[in-house]
Image: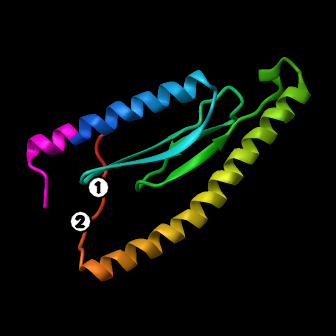
Amino acid sequence: MPLDLYEDAAEKSKLLQVRMLIERLLQAHDLCADVVLAGRGRVEVFTVLDASWSRVSMLELPGGGFGLRLRSKVADYAGDRNKQRADLEFTTGMVSSFAELKARQGLAWLHASEFIDKQTGAEHTPLKGEPKQ
């Protein structure tokens, strides 16, 4: 049963409010995250990579994909190669963990979704992006 326009707007607002709360918590605790929030008929997906130790940033590619940019120059560390190496190790661990967990969980979610769709006869409209906030 689709939501009416008022319900859909309320759901969108709720998801954006929760996103802002999560982003503030991540910033306050110097953490990175890859987050999917689900509401009724909507999802909010975002990635936060701007912890002080993170050396990657997200790049949007033409056609809707994304990439990561790695930046680590010893000059940014006032010559402290040990600090630079530590940040690179933390960054590498994060990227590797995100990749492995998303791949494993993604396949499990895909299989579960296909099973539930088959059992319920559900059909879905394709996901669509909205303009950046």
Q: Amino acid at mark 2?
A: Thr
Coordinates of residue 29 in the picture (x, y in percent): 62, 25
Q: Is residue 65 left or right of residue 128?
A: right
- What crowding class fits label 2: few (fewer than 14 Cα within 10 Å), some (14-19), or many (20 or more)? few
Q: Secondary structure at mark 2?
A: loop
Query: Vertical placement of 112 versus 70: above or below?
Result: below
Q: Is residue 26 left or right of residue 74?
A: left
Q: Nearer the viewer, residue 12 or 81?
A: 12
Which residue is labeled 2 in the image? 125
Q: Quadrant of the C terminus?
A: top left
Q: Nearer the viewer, residue 84 or 114?
A: 114
Q: Secondary structure at mark 1?
A: loop
Secondary structure predominantly adopted by residues drawn in magenta: helix
Coordinates of residue 98 in the picture (x, y in percent): 63, 52
Coordinates of residue 130 in the picture (x, y in percent): 28, 45
Query: Vertical placement of 82 versus 41: above or below?
Result: above
121 part of magenta stretch: no
Query: Vertical placement of 94 versus 108: above or below?
Result: above
For the record, the magenta segment spans 1-10
Asked where in the image residue 131 lies, by quadrant, the reply is top left
- Using the rendered image of the protein, determine whether residue 133 is visible from the camera's viewpoint: no
